[in-house]
Image (tube, coloured by chain):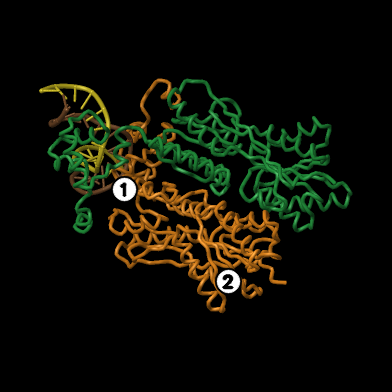
Chain colours: A orange, B green, C brown, D yellow
Amino acid sequence: MSDSAKATGIKAVGIKDVAREAGVSVATVSRVLSNGPVSDALRARVEDAVLATGYRPNLSARRLRSQHSQTIGLIVSDIRNPFFTAVSRAVEDAAFQAGMRVILCNTDENPEREAMYLRLMQEERVTGLIFAPTRATLAQLDRTDLDFPVVLIDRSAPAGRFDSVVLDNPQAAALLVDHLHGQGYRRIAGLFGNTSTTAVERHAGYQAALAAHGLHAEARFVPPTAEAAEAEIARWLAAAQRSGAMPDAVMVSNSLLLMGVVKATRTLGLTIPGDLAVTGFDNEPWTELVGPGLTVIEQPVHEIGRAAMTLLFERLDDPERATRKVVLSGTCVARGSTGGVG
Amino acid sequence: MSDSAKATGIKAVGIKDVAREAGVSVATVSRVLSNGPVSDALRARVEDAVLATGYRPNLSARRLRSQHSQTIGLIVSDIRNPFFTAVSRAVEDAAFQAGMRVILCNTDENPEREAMYLRLMQEERVTGLIFAPTRATLAQLDRTDLDFPVVLIDRSAPAGRFDSVVLDNPQAAALLVDHLHGQGYRRIAGLFGNTSTTAVERHAGYQAALAAHGLHAEARFVPPTAEAAEAEIARWLAAAQRSGAMPDAVMVSNSLLLMGVVKATRTLGLTIPGDLAVTGFDNEPWTELVGPGLTVIEQPVHEIGRAAMTLLFERLDDPERATRKVVLSGTCVARGSTGGVG
DNA sequence: ATGAAAGCGCTAACAG
DNA sequence: CTGTTAGCGCTTTCAT
């Protein structure tokens, strides 16, 4: 049927063709398609006609007419970041389950791309947006007005205009510091990314926890790449070794940096945790396999995605309700990389 | 403006409002929007009106009227699989660059979900589809007729009905076997996934290469999860140890299985490569950090994504041209996990 | 170069 | 329960 259609250039079948085939009105066909009130007899005839004609509804037409896109936007920095990979999977599962589609966009933390994708979201008339913005865009967002609700993830809102879901970063960082302290470590260095609010918060938690233990904080900030972390930590440790002020542990603010640090220990010939305890964020599968296993904070990635979707649906349900900020806790997965001093 | 619109419930601005504001016809506005032939004077007036009204085109309406969706579908098994993560990023970059949007779907290798998403693709009237199907769906695909071109990735086409881009899997597997052989290994076990054509091809290459070296192949097939691989390899090695027929190396058909194997060696207390050399596919960042570094095949992931998009565009350009199969080569990244016997 | 008018395929009143 | 009809917002002839 559609084979011959293709060959002969006959136009695609529409609801009209189905109606003719079934001997009913287009309205009846539409009702069958949307499970409206139709007698069993007609319903059966229509369903047969749908099969016979190979009819497929045209979603563009449906969206135009019904005025809702059944589409949610998801804007992240880079889908290759395992955190966003997992979140996006959760978002997509929840969306498809609710009969919605997802438009995924990667910004590379570039404000121009963020602006462009924000525009796209408007043109798509998305039902809602889940967004991990840069600090710059976050500020602008407050002055922009969008025609759809936005849920912020990973990055926290400045004011309270948007719903958001974030990890309790200070608490998570403190968890790591406390764990290290409990294992007997006292000279705890910190390495943090220099672009995100996330790193800022983790640094704050790190500092506070160290202070609580009466310990001295020694933190550095680097661009969020494994290479930068590797170079910085190598330089740092070499200098520390010479001055006899080696840290006995280092905590790192994300998994990219963590990889860099592990690489550096190899290059320098340091053993983990003998020469240096190592710990960081994100319980990716491979962290279990590296060295004696890496102690890390596990983020509830799937919950974060789900929570964002829930927040979005609740907001759609009641546009007037107060803004919410869902703060999820991380857990410390202790492994050999912080095995203890001595 | 749209703030008050929201508050007062005034409808969103459309092309008509812009036309009125600019004192021109809707056709002229449309032409300005699509860079059609319009006098500079009117063009300027329209552009001002667009800014003044805060107009955003409605893509659903545009798509309905113009009969092309500017949308490409991407159906993969799981975006969390690093291979697909990387490919999807490449596809999305190429798509957005061409002014197209991407619908990403995860099937979990479930034929029912594949069928459902294939249906969705039709309803979205996608311009084209990039698809990594299961064997089951691949077979069906030949009998289905779609209204859009399909480019297969990762999984190879049976007949020649679809364009496709794949890794040269037999060659890559042979590369690994040859490397192991060169390092002095002679009892080379193989562990393969049992769902994809990919694993079948890699198994074929493995077998052929072993035969060429006059060696005996001993392969097993497991569900594509780290857990299955871990359990199977543990059982296998335990039995082999008892019977005194331990392999001295094992090659694995994907990175998920590879993780399982590494875990098993830890549980069993085997050293890599002393007790067992280990090698597999996909040069993920962490493979460098595990044990003495894992020898792996590196796939040109970004090229695969780009090539798929190129194939798709060329097909759209000329629907009649002969089907193409782009076969990309992997490279062997040698590391300590295949350090050599003795 | 510009405008008037005819739909794209569908849903949603409104009648009956 | 069923059919008729009027658009959703836009692009695209076809005139001018």
Residue A318: x, y in percent? 32, 63
Q: Is residue B170 above or below residue A198?
A: above
Give the vertical position of A3 relative to B99 (above or below): above
- Report the quarter where the N terminus of chain A lies: top left
Residue designated by label 1: A122
Q: Residue at x 78, y 49 (%)?
A: B273
Can residue B333 be seen by looking at this rendering? yes
Q: CA distance from mark 1 to mark 2?
A: 44 Å
Is residue A45 at least partly visible in the picture?
A: no
How far from the left and from the top, in percent, is residue A255? 56, 57
- Image quadrant where one finds the C terminus of chain A: bottom right
**Amino acid residing under circle 1:** Gln
Say which residue appears at 69% left-offset and 58% top-offset.
Answer: A291
Task: Answer with the quarter of the image where residue B61 lies.
Answer: top left
- As drawn, is A68 to the left or to the right of A325? left
Q: Residues within 10 Å of mark 1 (few under 14, many from 20)?
A: many
At a point 31% along the width and 61% down the height, the residue shown is: A319
- Please rate how many residues cluster around mark 2, counting C-alpha atoms within 10 Å: few if below 14, some from 14 to 19, many from 20: many
SS under mark 1: helix
- Judging by the rendered image, the residue that carries numbered circle 2 is A177
Mark 1 or 2: in front is: 2
Identity of the amino acid at label 2?
A: Val
